[in-house]
Amino acid sequence: MFFAYFIAFISVLLIWTFVDNFLPSKKHPPGPFRLPIFGNALTFLQNKSTGKPVFVLFKDLAKQYGPVVFLRMGSQPTVIVDDFETSKILLNNEVWIDRPFNDMMAERSYGKPLGIIFVGGEGWREMRRFTMRSLRDFGYGKQNSMQSIIDDEVKTILNEVETVAGKDKPLLNIKHFFTLPVLNILWSMVSSVRMPGDEEKLKKLIILVDNLAKATPIGGSILDLFPSLRHYFPGLTGITFVRKCVEELQNHFQEVLDSRREEGGYKQGNRDYIDIFINEIERHKELGSNPNHYTDEQFITTITDLFEGGSETSSNTLEFAFYYVMKNPNVQSKVQAEIDQVVGRSRLPNTGDRPQMPYTEATLIEAQRMANVLPVTVRSSTENCRLNDFEVEKGCMAIVNIYSMHMDESFWGDPNTFRPERFLDENNKIIPLKANRVIPFGAGKRVCLGEQMARATVFTYFSALLQSYSFEEVPEKNTVSNNKSDLHRDPETIRFEEEVHVGFTLSPNPYHTKVVKRQ
Ligand code: HEM
């Protein structure tokens, strides 16, 4: 009897495998062989042994199968989109407006679809609209208000660099150098009221956000394939640690909310985003709104999203930008010459100078192209649809491989070379056709909510520091070793071993730079 069940079970698996992989009526995009239940676990396992990050695997798969590749993450149907044209269509299409919300994401939001980054549907629409509107009311996106917040932080950071420059050994450890100033800007946009101990709390927040990011690397983890494993092996799968970080973050923001309620100033009118949120919570409580999007849990998850979305991404971009100009002193000199010519030395640069500084602009676009701080963005389909010539079912996950587009040899020619000139025409003007191919912030209605803030922060920090200082290489202090290079190994793999740290976001491996005050 047992034997008969066993044969039946094996037969079902074989039929399942055949139907999923070979049945012609299924117009899925092409992709590597899939197993029942395990989907493409073998593809990821094989890749792990090569040391390549998953987005490099996706790029390799696209070379083999074409720009749209079909995979199963466990049983989750998934398309990988690798080319610019299809990505643009997908990112701008209402059908792909959602993000997949699975058990892993629920871990960071009280088991409910809350916040902005990881949810879809009406909850996302409401929170995104509300957050954008509220932040705008307090100056987000308005050049003068945002610039004055950034300028305050720039002055602090310039003082710190000045201290380093004055030392016998003027070496600056770049790792996390920008994290606190970037977080301060974000915090100033959200909270205009300073509470006792805020500075210390922000420092603690950096550690928590960093830990959380490290504990959730991008794609290819066993939990992406089988999220339910976390119930059975919480320690082994790292979920115990994630839960601890999430709990500490949630407690932190609950304290913020509680101390504001105690302070009571929100009753006199809205001073900032937190006041607006508290007043909305009170209003919806009175109305008995159903569904109620405005709760303490919603506030805490949304604000966690802003911090997770905004702190690492901007500071890593700056770490990369300084890394590239340190490695390319000729580019650094050209940026400095442009700053001298357009801004001079008597005032700080600001975002109003950007249109007159095409070389600096091109350098930052090139830094973002190569850095790929967020190498992929993820969406999911709200209904059955077509993607190019293929059929895709409702609930299918799409991984848009930003990395692949930024490193596409057929478009860029020499994608591994840092060359801002590729974005400039013979009249020193930015070439829109090329600049628009760089999409570090994604695109469409779910484009990064913090894009304007990030662009303003990165431009101002970068140009203000280069206005007064040069940053030189210190080979003996840098952990990056060149002796591992081997001509027979894949240059992309070498780069990811030596230059780039792959976590939830990408950052350069820790490095030191010598600070030299400009004459
Ligand atoms: C250089 C810095 C940054 C980079 C490279 C970056 C990149 C991205 C990308 C690629 C997405 C997904 C977009 C899509 O699916 O089309 C995104 C979404 C998001 N980002 Fe950023 N980001 C940066 C800075 C920020 C900042 C400063 C904030 C906070 C104010 C922020 C908050 C968010 C939020 C809330 C979302 C989710 C938007 C939604 O789903 O509606 N980001 N970001």
Image: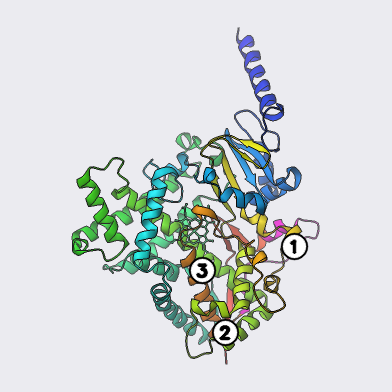
- The local secondary structure at tag 1 comes to loop
Q: Earlier in the sequence, mark 2 or mark 3?
A: 2
Image disc number at residue 455: 3
Image disc number at residue 339: 2
Quarter of the figure with residue 43: top right
Q: Amino acid at mark 3?
A: Arg
Q: Which residue is mark 1?
A: 485
- Measured from the top left, where is residue 52 in percent x and y? 67, 51
Label 3 CB sits under 8 Å from any ligand 1 atom: yes
Q: CA distance from mark 2 to mark 3?
A: 17 Å
Specify the farthest residue to the bottom: 519
* Magenta range: 472-495
Specify the farthest residue to the right: 488
Q: Residues within 10 Å of mark 1 (few under 14, many from 20)?
A: some
Q: Name the residue at 54% across, 79% down.
A: 463
Relative to 156, say whether 97 is above or below. above
Where is the N terminus found, in terms of image quarters? Answer: top right
Q: Is residue 224 one of those drawn in magenta? A: no
Quarter of the figure with residue 478: bottom right
- Measured from the top left, where is residue 25 in percent x and y? 69, 27
- Measured from the top left, where is residue 129 in percent x and y? 39, 54
